[in-house]
Each structure stands twice: as C-alpha cells, then as structure tokens.
Image (cartoon, helix red, strand yellow):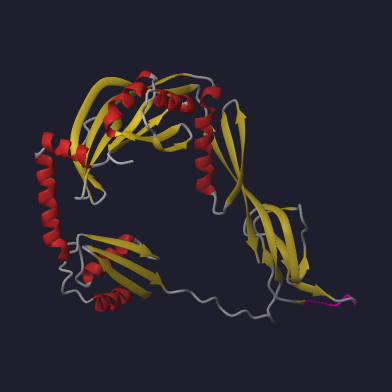
Amino acid sequence: MKNSCRVTFEGLNFTRLLALLNKNGIPVGNVSRRGKLCTIEVPSARSEQTLAILRERCYNIIGIEFFGMPKAAKFVKKHFVLPLICLLAVLVLAVSSQFCLRIETVGDFEREAVCAALNEVGVSVGTNLHSLNLNDVQNKLANKLDAMYAVVTRSGSVLYVNAVAKKEIAPPIDLDERRDIVAERSGVVANIVCEQGTPLVQKGDSVRKGDVLIAGRRTFNDGVSEDVYALGRVTLTVCETGFAPFDGMKTVTAETGNVFECTGVVLFEKQYAADCPFESYTVSTVVTRLFPLNLAIVRNVYRETVSSRVPATIEECVERLRTEAFCRAMELCDFAVVETVYETAENGVYARCYGEIHIQ
C-alpha cells in the first residue's frame, strides 16, 4: 500500500475490529496475526482515525511505522535538523566505506578468539580495506587459530569471517578386543538392536548410568564362550525435571505516570537515541523511513512502571510457573526434547522433559 501506515497492536476480536474499520471506510491491507498480536496497514491519511478507533476500543498499540514520500517530506519539514545530520552521516560513511566498520564471524570459533587472531595479523575495525590482501589474511588467520581453513570476504565496509576447526579422527577399532556397550546415563530402554555380543536388557527395562546393555561376550551352542567387540544400538528414553516453587505471591506491574520521550536515528539496523532513565518501563515506538536514503527516524515514548508483590493462588500463576519449570529442565537437557509433561503441586510446578539418546 503506497503512502501507508503500519500499526502493530495487541488485543482480541480482530474480526469485529476489521469490520468496524471497513464500516468507517478505512482500507486495510497486509493483515497479519500471531496470537494476540496483529499488524495492519492503512493509508497514511487515515492513520489518526485508525489509531483513535483502536484507542477507543482499548487495544494496546505496540508500534506505528509510516511509509512513503509524503510522510517523509512532512517529517523533514518539521524536524529538518535530524535528516540533515543523517544525510551528513551517510556522506561520511560513503567516503569512509574503504575502512572496516564491522567484523561478522561464523564457524567453529568464538568471536573473541577470531577477532584477537585478526588483530594479531593487523586486521581490526578501522583497517583500510582497499589495500587488504584477503588471501594472505585467510592463511595467517588459519595458522593463528590452528584451524582447518578460514574464509574472509568483504561486503562494503563489513568483513565476514568463517573459520572451521580441524576435525578429530576417531581411533581405529580393534575388533579382537572385548568391549561392552554401557549406558551413558539413566533411562528406559526404548529399542535395542544387537549385531554382536549378548544383550542384557530388553525393551521397557530401566537402567542406570554405567549398566552394561550389550555384553562383549558370545556363547556358542556347545556352551563355549569368548570375548568379542560388542556391536549394536540401544535407544534410551531419558528425562530431566525442572521445578518452579510457588510462594503464594505474584508480581503485578503498573505505570507510575512518568513519561520520557526522545527522537533517534536507525542507521545500519542500529538505533542511536538517548538512553531511558527508568529502570523499569514499557516503550512505544513510531518509525518514519526516509526514502531513498535507507534511513529511519524513531520516536520513542517510555512509560515508567513499578512492580509489586501481591497474594495470589497457584492457578493464577500456573502459566508463569510452567515456563520457569520448563526453562530449568531445559538447562539440564543435553538431548532433543520431544515431550514435556507438567505436574502442579501445592508447593509449585514440575516440568518433565522427555527425549531419546542412542548408544552404540
């Protein structure tokens, strides 16, 4: 929609709201909904009327974003200093595009280690990219990190680095040695496939860490046995439990009435604006994009909030407690969770996360 206003809000009864907007002759496009959150686009000329209807129906407006040249021209006329500063910043960046302004890293190494190694070979933020030999940087970086290889590419004033660690080669298997397949952790046997050796458990058995699942022993029909290298695959169903205690209270957040407003600039996806003086707050943001400069002016309105503890029942807090219990259980999980079961008790909520591991 040309010269449009995108409004993001929270609430219920979206169908009734859309019907009301249509009744008032307001065209609505690009409607997207996720849970209680909804985003719509309306003509910029009808934005004030749309916002008035939303406020009248007690919808919580999250963000407002304008698109199109007329709104940009209006903003420039009203706040001419900021666009001038932004334009100057763009010109400075255009002149300095031959210098490295940012380093992005991916791969097997921590960002700090990669940046430290780059710094040792003479590459950092501010380095002149015009005379930089990327092949030479790649070789030196791989040697510094003791990596298998490193790839360094440039896009504008950004360096992209991908360093891949050397792969460890598993030691060769000596099939003449005895080897047992042992449980790496406690769980319940979900499946067992034995190719060589003697299975000591079956489906449904509970095992503890260290229990032998498939013994490296083979017995012949005449009763003679010999040691072998056990081969097979055992699937265990495993579980980790998280607990969130309930103390009979809940946290309630309310606005104090103190408001802080500021205007800032979004440049290269980073916002430059004054810091909010409140420790706890909610924020609503209005974004005006200035085409074709690829800049955005943001207007932030911060509303201070204060939290207090009030008595509550466990039913009122069960969703929050479930989330806390789940997060604590996930901290213990080193497997992919396929099912989560919640149990509510008088003193709190338990979250049991189930998954599977394969031992072979």
Q: Nearer the viewer, residue 210 or 192?
A: 192
Q: Is residue 213 above or below residue 87?
A: below
Residue 314 location, quadrant: top right
Q: Is residue 239 above or below residue 12?
A: below
Q: Is residue 132 above or below residue 333?
A: below
Residue ID at (51%, 36%): 323
Residue ID at (69%, 65%): 233
The quadrant of the rendering that contains the N terminus is: top left
Q: Nearer the viewer, residue 176 or 264?
A: 264
Give yes or no for residue 223 being in the magenta stretch.
yes
Residue ID at (24%, 33%): 300
Q: Nearer the viewer, residue 38 or 202?
A: 38
- Left or right of 316? Residue 77 is left
Q: Main secondary structure of the magenta part?
A: loop
Residue 215 locus on image (x, y percent): 74, 68
Q: Residue furthest right?
A: 222
- Left or right of 260? Residue 32 is right
Which segment is the magenta one?
A: 222-226
